[in-house]
Structures are given as C-alpha cells and as structure tokens.
Amino acid sequence: MERKMRLSNRLETVASFVAKGSIVADVGTDHGYIPICLVEREISPAAIGMDVRKGPLERAVEHILEHGLEKVIDVRLGDGLEKLEPGEADTVVIAGMGGELIIHILDGGRRLWDSVRDWILSPQSDLEKVRLFLWENGFEAEAEAMVEEDGKYYTVMKCRRSLAPRSVPALSLLEQRYGRMLLQEGSPVLRAYLEQEIRQLCAVRERLLASGTEKARKRLKEVEEELNTAKEAYDEVQRNYQDS
C-alpha cells in the first residue's frame, strides 16, 4: 500500500473545511486525492469521487486501489452532480475549476440543495459571480480562506443553505469581489494578494496613459475603478488586521 496521501496547500485547506464524520462527494475529483485523504485521516467514513472525464476517473480508481480504499470510496462518471442522489452525501466539494462552471454545477444540482449540509467551493475565477449566486440563492458563508501556492492565490469557501430569514446584510461590491469574512478578519494572505493586484493595476494604468489611444482611454477608466476598489479593500484589510 502507498504511504498516506499528501495534499497541496490549496487542497489541504479544502480538506480542513470538511467536518469530521461527513460523507463527502467530490465533484471533479480528478486523481481522487481529496476522497483518499479524507478517508485515510478518518475525517470521512466513506466518500464519492465524481468526474465528467473518463481518464482522470480511471487514475482516481488506480490511486484508490493503491491505498486499499475501494470498499469505502465510490467513483462515478458523470457531469457535475447528476450521478449524486439526495441523502448520499452531506458534504459536497467543488474545487479546481472556473467560477461559472461551479455556478452551472450548483444550478444543475438544485434537487440536492436541501439534503447537503456543507458546500465547500474553490473557484479559480469569477469569485464575484459565485458569491453573488450563493447569496441570491440562500447560501451563507460559514468559513472562507485564501491560500498562496506557487505564486498563485486561491480562495476556499464553506457554505450552508439556510431557509430562515436573512440575518446578515446583502454583500457589498467589495465583499462580492474579495469576500466578507476575509475582509473582516484582516486576512494577511488577502492583503498580500491586494498588494500584488495594486502593483499590477498601477503598471497597466501607466501603459494606458502612455498609449493615448481612444481604446486605451476607455480601458483606463475601467482600470482606475478596479484600482480604487482594490485600494479600498486593502485599507479595510489593513485596518481589520491591526485591530485583530
């Protein structure tokens, strides 16, 4: 048997959001790392790995067999959540794909919304759209983290759907873009990300100013708005970090 599964920083964060005792369905399981890790660490008594691609799922099966976990980890070939039935899992992980695809998967799995307790998501793009979709459909953030890995930044969020009346205000533009919880806790990783984003936007602004074309002038207005938003977020993170 192989030694126990080791995960990247990003996937470690995903795994840390899973409550002990959860039956987990991992959408887009790829090599099956998340289900294997959760079962080996005795966080999950059983898990389901799902993928729309046959090749990655075959590799997942190989890894599951190597770790001797074929009796407790099921694998299913299918698109999104189509092969998961209500009551089979209380936690769903959707990580390592674009935000619009995550929205598409969530929307297609509406029949599961009330039977799944925890949704752990890690969009690689369009975080604003994902957060807004979640808010509009009754999901509320339980936890959120940002991690840096190989020079790239990743966000992981844990959400639950509530049928009770809203107890928190709607998300502001700043919160949609950067995450209410990350801003409030003064996340040092978010601060580092914002420092990088501000530098990059300043460099883009200088190039556009030097260009002087009509197209550049239009883009300049957008960049300045993005820069102002990033600076506002940085100020809030810095203030909250100092107060913590």
Image (cartoon, grey):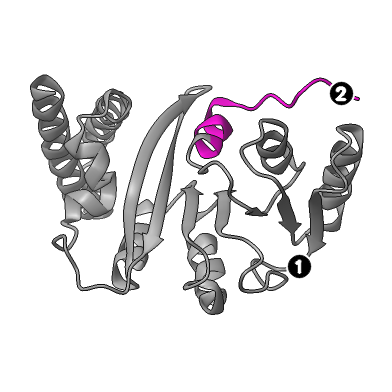
Look at 82% across and 44% down and name the residue there.
60
Depth check: 63 or 231 in front?
Answer: 63
* 68 vs 223: above or below: above
* SS type, badge 2: loop
* Residue sitting nearer the eye, 220 or 184: 184
Residue 25 figure quarter: bottom right
Relative to 172, 47 lies left or right: right
Residue name at image x 35 percent, y 73 percent: 137
Q: Which residue is mark 1?
A: 78
Residue carrying label 2: 2
Nearest to the observer: residue 109 or residue 125: 109
Residue 94 x %, y %: 56, 53
The numbered disc on residue 63 is none
Quadrant housing the N terminus = top right
Q: Amino acid at mark 2?
A: Glu
* Residue extending farthest bottom: 111
Residue 209 can be seen, yes or no = no
Q: Which portion, as a residue range, is magenta?
A: 1-15
- Where residue 21 appears, as percent x and y from the top left, is 58, 46
Q: Residue at x 53, y 22 (%)?
A: 150
Q: Residues within 10 Å of mark 1 (few under 14, many from 20)?
A: some
**Number of other residues with Cα within 10 Å of mark 2, as a class: few under 14, some 14 to 19, many 20 or more:** few
Q: CA distance from mark 1 to mark 2?
A: 28 Å
* Sequence-first disc among 1 and 2: 2
Q: Look at label 1 and name its amino acid.
A: Gly
- Give the structural element (helix, strand or loop) at label 1: loop
Q: Nearer the viewer, mark 1 or mark 2?
A: 2
* Residue 219, placed above or below residue 88: above
Look at the image and tell me in which quarter the C terminus lies: top left
Say whether residue 41 is left or right of residue 69: left
